[in-house]
Amino acid sequence: MGELLEQLRSLEQRAQASRKSVGKAWSRTAAVAQAGLAKQTVSGWFSEKTPRVPKDHDELWKLVEVYSKWVGESPSRSYWSSLLDASRSAQRPSNTGLGRLIEEWDPLSLEVHEAIDAGAIDAGLPSMPQYIMRPHDESLRSVVSRASQGTNSMAVLVGGSSTGKTRACWEAVQLLPRPWKLWHPIDPGRPDAVVQALNDEIDSHTVIWLNEIQFYLLSSAGERIAAGLRELIRNPTSGPILILGTIWPEHWCRLTDQPASSQSDQHAQSRELLSGTDITVPDTFDENALIKLESAAHSDPRLTAAREHQYADGKITQFLAGAPDLVKRYHNSPSTVKAILNAATDLRRFNYGPTIPESLLKELASDYLDMNTIGNLKEDWFEENVYNLCLPSKGTPGPLNRIRPKFSETSPQNEKEIRLSDFLEQHSREERKEIFPTNEFFCIAYYLTDNPESLYAVARQLDNTGRALLAAQFYYKSLLLGDTRSAEDLAGLLSLAGDKPGAISILEGNVTDYDNSMSDEFIRLLAKQEEEDRLVKICRTELVRGNARPLVAAFDAYKETSKRKVIEGKVLHAKEEPEEQRIRNMKTATKEMQKQLSEIKMSIDKLNKLMKSDQPRKKEFANANHEIDFYINNGKWNIAKKKMIGFLNSEFFDQEHFADVYKRWGETEKHNMIMRFGVNADGEPANPWSLVDVIRVSS
């Protein structure tokens, strides 16, 4: 049993010492009886010769709770579950494939939220309250049923934090019989685990558990993962396989929305993978669910408390996850605590993480305090507040969770990290969505971050909010650290800013083949810079290899018929090419153009469907513009500008919508400046900038 037995014996010894110190009798038999367990079951765990691994998480937890209560400690169920899981893994033969039988899992180790206590421990109730079925459960169970009947299937539950997404998945997989296994890919890292498995082989009758699927699909390996999962699902010989995921609505939109015309399409594979898999999980219980809750509450104090406190708004699952207490702790906290939480929230709003190095958070938090407060801080103010924020309340985790490093702490890459509570993050995101952090905030984040994925994520969000120069600086550092996704986005911003030579220099060192959107942008830039000889050489070389994509990109760039005919002549009708090769080139080019025309038609069809379904948003835009025009008409430009900046910061307006307000009111020059160079934090057009300004920050 290894570490589990060691920790269990240590806890028992502390319990024995504690009982004796207050003059009370101690015996393992008494503890086992209080826990409601069989004596022979527990004696096997403590056997000196052949200790047996507990078969059931609940049984282990009952004994841990009794001993911890005697000692006066507050145990972590997830910690003990992880010890049990590790012991089981050590005993399991190495040839059993990924995952383990569903019955062997503890739902808390699969990231189901712990519920409030409300007296459930003293009443000897299971760790999770009775489950209340809701309409989305029927949809999910239909998907699970298809998988159990032999069809590869996938479902992604889309809903806010603590709405019951992960618990719904857990309840649904209970329908799957043996030999179904469940695999939760997290080691050596979530994306790496999936990439490695896709390169090897995933057994049939496996549930791939992708809780918070954005951590997989928004990573630098996201498109590889999405493509691999698509291939797995559509391969009938691989199954049956069931993929279950959960995600917040905002992350779902990031992965499934079509990108802006100025941005690269980083999620094409993910969009296809997720298409048609979504099952919406509402924030609230409907009338039927509340009736079921009324009945179940009689036998569970947690459900009784949820019914009494949250009946009016129906947010039952949020209450059970301790959400109201988290919000109160946030709103009633002193300035130092709020500074830490706001800094963590703002980093997450810009998609940094999900974990945050403590050193970075400490520096950022100071930016949220005034000088008088900073001058009176104790030396260990940050450490003390973080410790308190990590403490649980009413049986549920605190606002922060400290993530311990896996390896030796002597390495700077393994410093302790912090994770913000999911629910508090979502709540604070909404409250702070119109606030743009200070330049100092981004300066600290830039210089203290060496994770290319986090830098790229921040850059992308800055890009979405029109801060083009800041975005370019983060893209550039991410690129220097190895995230090549940044090259295309950075080149796009440089091209808009008029620095096409700079854009070409970024792309030419990162285009490794000529069959993707990055190479298309490179070809278009060469055309705009009239580097005709270089462009022709690339097109001819790729055509010989059977790839006409660069040529079609060149045709697209050269809108003028005369220039297009020149390129066509030099590439397709070159006299030095043998007749047979020219015929092959023509066939290859024709096939590629037909393929792209088909793709364009599909994109137009999707766009038309999207526009038809987006009528409510159009109405919201019209109302927002009407409100802004009202303030401007009445001479209240400052109020109008504040509204505009809030809309931009919250991504309700994109850069083009923001600039259009200036254009509508005759400020054409400002409109053009914003479209080219973006905006400053205050909403004013940014000054002209180029690659030189981007590089200067990194040197």
Image (spheres, grey):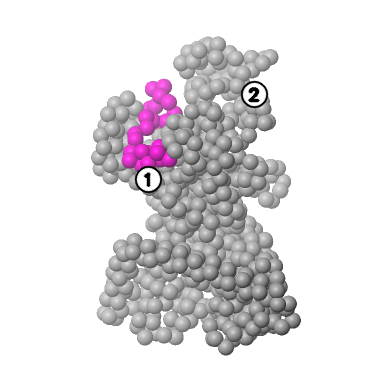
Q: Dot 1, crowdedness within 10 Å: few (<14), some or many (≥20)?
A: many
Query: Is residue 318 shown left or right of residue 56?
Result: left
Label 1 sits on what residue type? Val
Q: State the residue at coordinates (29%, 67%).
A: 619
Q: State the residue at coordinates (54%, 29%).
A: 179
Q: State the residue at coordinates (43%, 26%).
A: 126
User: Which label is found at residue 297?
Assistant: none
Q: Is residue 308 visible?
A: no
Query: Is residue 691 shown left or right of residue 269?
Result: right
Q: Is residue 617 above or below residue 182?
A: below
Label 2 sits on what residue type? Met
Residue 456 falls in image quadrant: bottom right
- Label 2, secondary structure: give it: loop
According to the image, label 1 marks what residue? 281
According to the image, label 2 marks what residue? 1
Q: Which range is magenta? A: 117-143
| Mark 1–mark 2 distance (CA, rounded to whole Å) | 39 Å
Tell me where residue 571 appears, x and y as whole percent.
Answer: 66, 79
Q: Is residue 670 visible?
A: yes
